Amino acid sequence: MSKNNVLKASVVIAFYNNIKALKLVIRALETQSIADFEVVIADDGSNSTTVEQLEVLQQNSHLQIQHVWHEDKGFRKNRCLNLAVQAAKNEYLIFIDGDCVPQTHFVEDHLSEAQLGRCLNGRRADLSPKMTQILFKTNQPAHFVKSHLWQLLWNYVRGGGKNIEKGIRIPSDKIRKYLQKKNKGIVGCNFSLHKSDLLSINGFDKRYEAAGTGEDSDVEYRLRLVGIEIHPLFYKATQVHIYHSELPRSSENDALFTKIKAEKKAWTEFGIN
């Protein structure tokens, strides 16, 4: 534990050029229910114009924000996440994407169930294009689900968005436990763990150079090999995902993951060290 036995978090944001979305994410983090955390932006090679805007964002925010950047050589999210892990000053890491807007209790909820030897597995609500437009106009992005719940649900039943129920925070442990019966894998946009647990598998495998698998399924598999518990955090630590077309998935990722599972090696030689 850190000083005074208070666990402190570093929120790692995977980012690339979408400064409009990042501004929403930072605004949402500025109004969290707790304030004692830092932000580390893992920038996978954004252009100079975006970096300049990001610097202004840093200067104007009361948050402690680090910006970790490397050269744009294609999709190298895992490499950049490893750089962010090394830069993180706090002992607990919360991973989100730069197009996922955390709701009010996001950081607090992650810390409330944090334990050594445990990886917390959250979810997101995928907004429709219509609700995404409304989100960009709101003054309080961290309160979006609470303030637009009925509109979100009405839009959902009419075919807008996906998994909107995952954006609803349920305070009751008993109800959440009932709803969390299925053992689902972690998603890269919403999970957390102690830095020491991630370092025990040498972080993210940099050989994954396309969306999917590398920053979640692979990490989960290797964490399980060293005995890390994957603990669900559904209907808690909620976030909403800004609509965009899906990124292409790579068959090379799948082939690499199949190879890693056959080898049954938790430690990757292509990680942080």
Image (cartoon, helix red, strand yellow):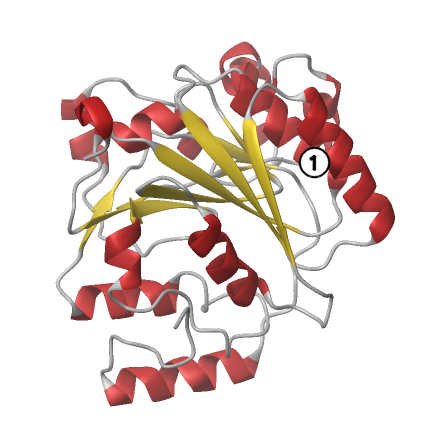
Vertical arrangement, residue 273 with respect to residue 113, above or below: below
Q: Horizontally, is 180 left or right of 215 in the view? A: left
Q: Which residue is mark 1?
A: 21
Q: Residue at x 43, y 73 (%)?
A: 205
Can residue 6 be seen by looking at this rendering? Answer: no
Vertical arrangement, residue 194 with respect to residue 26, above or below: below
Q: Horizontally, is 44 left or right of 114 in the view? A: right
Q: Residue at x 45, y 86 (%)?
A: 255
Kindly indicate the quadrant of the structure image that contains residue 52.
top right
Kindly indicate the quadrant of the structure image that contains residue 133.
top right
Q: Residue at x 46, y 80 (%)?
A: 254
Q: Could you tell me which quadrant the N terminus lies in?
A: top left
Can residue 72 be seen by looking at this rendering? Answer: yes
Vertical arrangement, residue 206 with respect to residue 138, above or below: below
Q: How many other residues sit within 10 Å of disc 1, few (<14), some (14-19) or many (≥20)?
A: some
Residue 1 vs residue 218, the one in the foreground: 1
Measured as percent of width and height from the top left, residue 165 is found at: 42, 31
**Kind of residue at badge 1:** Ala
Measured as percent of width and height from the top left, residue 47 is found at: 82, 54
Looking at the image, the residue that sits furthest to the right is 49
Looking at the image, the residue that sits furthest to the front is 3
Measured as percent of width and height from the top left, residue 140 is found at: 61, 13
Q: Secondary structure at mark 1?
A: helix
Residue 186 vs residue 12, the one in the foreground: 12
Q: Residue at x 32, y 57 (%)?
A: 185
Q: Could you tell me which quadrant the C terminus lies in?
A: bottom left
Measured as percent of width and height from the top left, residue 220 is found at: 30, 62
Q: Horizontally, is 8 left or right of 142 in the view? A: left
Kindly indicate the quadrant of the structure image that contains residue 20.
top right
Total marks shown come to 1
